[in-house]
Amino acid sequence: QVQPVESGGGLVQAGGSLRLSCAASGRTLSRSAMGWFRQAPGKEREFVAVIGWNGVNNDYAESVKDRFTISISRDRDQDTMTLQMNSLKPEDTAVYYCASGIAYWRGRFSSHMVNSANWGQGTQVTVSS
């Protein structure tokens, strides 16, 4: 599969909003979940949100629930996933990574679900206080 490509990062003040997008293409996408992860300086990469292949089932990290919204649109050749981030906090500052090919169906996300995922190169999100 082709590596997913993120866009939409940037610098925003605390309380502001940003919208990230991820474009992914490949033959097996139609049954694949996608998700967002982030890595802050000096920290391990962490789960942010995931959305199932049907675009309905999803899960969020507790730290972003009620502030971030994940969605996905599909056409024959490409999936586009977005992450709408509202009420941003300085602790949201990180490199945000998109992943496709996640083995998620519904319920709570588990780290083993990304064992065969395809990862993007990341986009920087910086929230100033």
Image: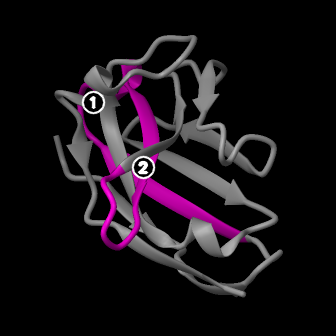
Give how far across and how far down residue 60 sits, in percent: 62, 34
Total numbered badges shown on the rendered structure: 2
* Residue at 56% over, 18% down: 54
Most foreground residue, 5 or 64: 64
Up-down relation of residue 20 to residue 128 (above or below): above
Q: Is residue 18 left or right of residue 98?
A: right
Q: In which quarter of the image is residue 70?
A: top right
- Which image quadrant: the N terminus? top left
Give how far across and how far down residue 120 sits, in percent: 28, 57
- The amino acid type, in three-letter code, at marker 2 is Phe
* Residue at 30% over, 69% down: 42
On residue 37, the disc is 2
On residue 51, the disc is none
- Which image quadrant: the C terminus? bottom right
Magenta-colored span: 18-45
Q: In which quarter of the image is residue 101?
A: top left
Mark 2 vs mark 1: which is more N-terminal? 2
* Residue at 45% over, 70% down: 94
Q: Is residue 103 left or right of residue 22?
A: left
Up-down relation of residue 116 to residue 75 (above or below): above
- The amino acid type, in three-letter code, at marker 1 is Val
Q: Is residue 40 in the magenta section?
A: yes
- The residue wearing badge 1 is 114
- Coloring basis for residues: one colour
* Residue at 60% over, 68% down: 91
Give the farthest residue toward the top: 106
Q: In which quarter of the image is residue 123?
A: bottom left
